[in-house]
Amino acid sequence: MDGEGEDASKVIHVKFVTKLYPPFKAPVSSVVIPSNVTRLGLSSIVNSLLTLEKPEAFDFLIDGELIRMSLEQFLLAKGISAERTLEIEYIRAVAPRKEEKPSLHDDWVSAVDGSSPRFILTGCYDGLGRIWSSPGSCTHILEGHTGAISSVAFVNSQGGESVTVATASKDRTLRLFKVDTAESGDSTTRVRAYKILRGHKASVQSVVAEKHGNMVCSSSWDCTINLWNTDESESELSVSGKKRKGNNQAEEAQLEGEAVTTFIGHTQCVSSVVWPEEDVIYSCSWDHSVRRWDVPTGKDTLNLYCGKALNTVDVGGEGSALVAGGGSDPVLRVWDPRKPGTSAPVFQFSSHSSWISACKWHESSWFHLLSASYDGKIMLWDLRTAWPLSVIDTHKDKVLCADWWKGDSVVSGGADSNLRISSGISIS
């Protein structure tokens, strides 16, 4: 008991600073706090200094590192003296403040794209793609695949009254859709593809669009990566155009396209591709490797091996240069190809309890990324701490896909057949 009283009597002089704007800006003056205070205690102290009507959750940094233990333990672990006045920076906690109503599908939700600020795109094991304008509001159904959809991508989604969408399927094809977003009415519009892309010899696992251009990239269980044109050319229509009847029995032209380029190098299923720069594509595979491809030459210029089959890869973070990947173990790995000896990850996060199905960097942060897992959880990470900032566990089964949406929300799909939206996430 005496020891507890002695610990409680230890105090530290601190000054709270922030880059936040009012009403989240506390007076910059030294205060005395107990040394054994935790993050929640620090948050209570700052809330009392701010006199907010509704309490706000905060995170805290000392020398650029997030505090995830008691203040006293942190200072001891980092060798920081408690004799001086400590400067502690506070930021709004990175955690969802609202869970939207789930959007039910007819089967597993296997793919999601949140890159459009206006819509969410999902792919489902029922072979249909869906476009959602808000939770529960499906505006368009994309039909035509004869197998489960494994990946979806907006090809262009910024502005305009129409968007182009690419879907990849276990039926070995990709399909391209033009969607008129100006169509009004309460009913859901069914859309057929204007172009079918054939050439893969096995299930197509991933599709990604060129950021500024008219091409998409796909990867497959046939171990290859293909590049395709998305445009509608008259020559293709006259040679490959086929007349198909839609649900309304009206004749419609449906083009068929062939791959422009094929990248060969992986020895097992190429599970995911990303296209972060005009001339650079990254891929990951069940052959345990992440590869970087030079688009003009088709040559791989970097190989990263991790000893595990990989399901997902993304590029972002500082300088949009960090590579995150996950797969057949619970570890989310981050590599920095700019550093010598790049085969070793610079970060490893191990809080999941099952395989990792998706990872995604936040587009406007150097530090933040998410991971999704078959353990049913989505975790939000910050490179400045080894522990997850927040755990989203609203899914009732395996999480198969996840993405950021509008900068402050996470959209995800899983084996519970639901699209879920966790919103109100503050990324500083």
Image (tube, helix red, strand yellow):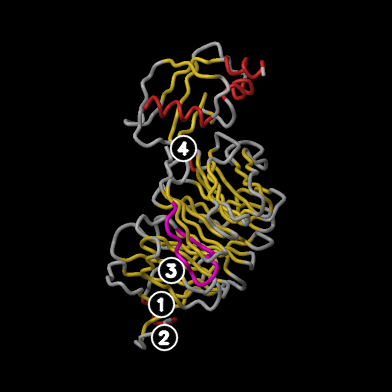
Chain-order first, disc 3 or disc 1: 3
- Cα gap from disc 4 to disc 3, whole angstroms: 32 Å
Q: From the viewer's perspective, tell me whether residue 203 is left or right of residue 268.
A: left
Q: Which mark is residue 244?
A: 2
C-alpha distance separating marks 4 and 2: 52 Å
- Across and down, in percent, residue 356 comes to 62, 53
Q: Is residue 296 magenta?
A: no
In the rendering, at what x and y percent does residue 137 appear? Answer: 37, 66
Contact (Cβ within 8 Å) of mark 1 with mark 2? yes
- Compared with 66, 310 (above or below) is below
Q: Helix, strand, or loop for circle 4?
A: loop
Magenta part of the chain: 99-113
| Residue on which disc 4 sits | 93
Residue 421 position, x and y percent, is 45, 55
Residue drawn 46% across the image and 55% down it: 411
Q: Residue drawn 41% across and 46% down?
A: 424
The residue that disc 3 covers is 130
The disc at residue 192 is: 1
Judge depth for marks 2 and 3 and give the one in front: 3
Quadrant of the image occupied by residue 263? bottom right
| Residue at 67 percent of width and 40 percent of height | 344
Q: Is residue 144 visible?
A: yes
Q: Residues within 10 Å of mark 4 (few under 14, many from 20)?
A: some
